[in-house]
Every structure is written in structure tokens, then in C-alpha cells.
Image (cartoon, helix red, strand yellow):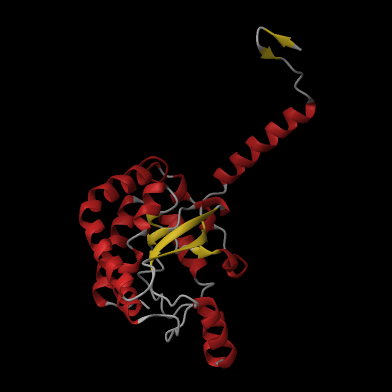
């Protein structure tokens, strides 16, 4: 019935049971989370710190991104590339990068793997290729220096990602991922996997890195990963 502009209705047992189930599921998810995720830093400091650092870095990063985008455009390609990735709690988001691949990258990869069994085995194990036929000459430089990742700072500002966290997964890679800690975290521009043996480890091994990071998540851990990332970038080991 309607009284004073408000709709009054009975709350059924079903409504109550549903609300209790939702609240219990939320509580269980929190209780089952690794210790680091439940820390004060993870809950109240990490996200504001991400935003502050991105805003501070923007005046220096934006000119670099603009110059690199112009170089890619001059070479005849669209400068930016977006792809759906898996975010926290399994929600998908659109990740931004500077373009490093040819326009028909998916078809190129499929043809290459079909005719190259060794590359197919490498791809199945690591989801990466040391000799990737999709990468352009400019893209090779961008990947070695990790400069192609700079537009992801926009994802950090939006809240899709964090500066430090697990490597963002593609949607079709979820079936290959054996862990669950990834889903408690925002994916990171850099992370424990990125500063470790990323070029030689299997894709499934990422779950071990993510579990370790989720357990030890702290300001000290994030600062240590960022510091090591600088060394990795300067060594130009990415591909």
C-alpha cells in the first residue's frame, strides 16, 4: 500500500534469508582472505597512495606518452591498444597500453603457432613468446623498456588497477590459473612476478607469486617491488 508517498511492503522470509546469505558470503570472503589483504595498509592506505603517486607522476609521464604515441602513429599504426582483462573479484576492465603489435595480431599468432610446434609449446606453458612475430620494431623497444605499460596509470587512476599487484590476466587465461589470491587484489602495473623470473616461469607459476604477495602485502613490500622494478626496466629484459 501507499502511505505519504512511500511504498510499504512486507519483508518475506525469502528477503531475510537472501540478505543473510549475502552478508555471510561477504564475511566469509573477508575471513578467508590472506593476512596482507586484511591489513590496515591494504584497506585504507594503498588506494589513496596509488592516486596520489599517479597525480604526482602525470606531468612527467604524459609528455613521454604523447611523444611515443606520435612515433607509433607516424609509423602508420593506431597508438593505443585496449584489451579486456580480469580485475578484482573477477570483474573485467579495459586495460590500456601503447600499441606494440601488428594490426592483425590474433590471426598472425594463430598462423605462427599452427606452423611452429616449438612456439606452440612455449605459448601453452608461459603464454608468452621470446620471438613473437606480432611485435613491431617500435614495439620491441617499448616492451624491452616497459614503456608500453605507461598508459596503465590511467587504469590505476580509475581504480581498475594498482601500481603494485598481480599481472593482469586476459579473460581466456582464467582457466589456466590455478590459484584464487589474484581475485582478492587489483592487478598491478608492476608486481612480484614482473620483477622475478617472468621470462622463464610458467603461467601457472603466477599463482605462487600472487599468493606470496597477498600474504606479505604491506607498504614495505610495495616499496621494495617498485625499487626492484626500476632495476628490471633499466636492464631492458622485457619482451
Residue at image x 55%, y 43%?
Answer: 30
Residue at image x 45%, y 51%?
Answer: 160
The vertical placement of 112 against 67, above or below, is: below
The vertical placement of 102 against 63, above or below, is: below
- Kindly tell me whether residue 127 is visible in this rendering: no
Q: In this view, does 110 lie to the left or right of 96?
A: right
Q: Percent position (x, y) of residue 95?
A: 45, 59
- Kindly tell me whether residue 232 is visible in this rendering: yes
Residue at image x 75%, y 18%?
Answer: 9
Q: In which quarter of the image is the C terminus?
A: bottom left
The vertical placement of 103 against 52, above or below, is: below
Quarter occupied by residue 180: bottom right
Q: How many marks?
A: 0
Residue at image x 25%, y 57%?
Answer: 62
Quarter occupied by residue 82: bottom left
Could you say which is closer to the camera, residue 104 or residue 51? 104
- Return the residue found at the far top: 4
Q: Percent position (x, y) of residue 105?
A: 49, 77
Q: Percent position (x, y) of residue 186?
A: 46, 53
Could you say which is closer to the camera, residue 172 or residue 200? 172
Could you say which is closer to the camera, residue 60 or residue 202? 60
Q: Percent position (x, y) of residue 100?
A: 38, 74
Q: Quadrant of the N terminus?
A: top right
Could you say which is closer to the camera, residue 212 or residue 69? 69
- Return the residue found at the far left: 60
Amino acid at each position: 500500500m501507499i502511505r505519504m508517498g512511500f511504498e510499504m511492503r512486507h519483508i518475506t522470509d525469502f528477503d531475510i534469508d537472501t540478505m543473510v546469505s549475502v552478508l555471510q558470503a561477504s564475511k566469509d570472503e573477508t575471513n578467508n582472505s590472506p593476512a596482507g589483504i586484511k591489513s590496515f595498509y591494504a584497506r585504507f592506505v594503498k588506494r589513496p597512495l596509488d592516486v596520489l603517486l599517479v597525480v604526482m607522476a602525470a606531468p612527467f609521464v604524459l609528455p613521454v606518452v604523447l611523444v611515443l604515441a606520435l612515433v607509433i602513429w607516424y609509423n602508420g599504426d593506431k597508438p593505443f591498444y585496449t584489451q579486456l582483462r580480469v580485475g578484482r573479484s573477477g570483474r573485467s576492465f579495459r586495460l590500456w597500453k601503447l600499441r606494440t603489435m601488428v594490426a592483425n595480431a590474433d590471426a598472425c599468432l594463430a598462423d605462427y603457432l599452427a606452423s611452429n610446434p616449438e612456439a606452440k609449446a612455449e605459448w601453452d606453458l608461459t603464454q608468452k613468446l621470446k620471438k613473437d612475430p606480432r611485435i613491431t620494431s617500435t614495439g620491441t623497444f617499448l616492451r624491452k623498456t616497459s614503456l608500453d605499460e605507461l598508459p596503465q596509470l590511467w587504469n590505476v587512476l580509475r581504480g581498475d588497477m594498482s601500481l603494485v599487484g598481480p599481472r593482469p590476466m586476459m579473460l581466456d587465461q582464467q582457466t589456466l590459473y590455478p590459484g584464487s589470491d589474484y581475485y582478492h587484489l587489483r592487478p598491478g602495473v608492476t608486481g612480484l612476478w614482473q620483477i622475478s623470473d617472468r621470462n622463464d616461469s610458467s603461467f601457472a607459476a603466477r599463482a605462487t607469486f600472487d599468493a606470496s604477495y597477498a600474504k606479505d602485502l604491506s607498504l614495505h613490500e610495495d616499496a621494495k617491488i617498485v625499487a626492484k622494478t626500476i632495476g628490471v626496466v633499466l636492464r631492458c629484459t622485457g619482451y
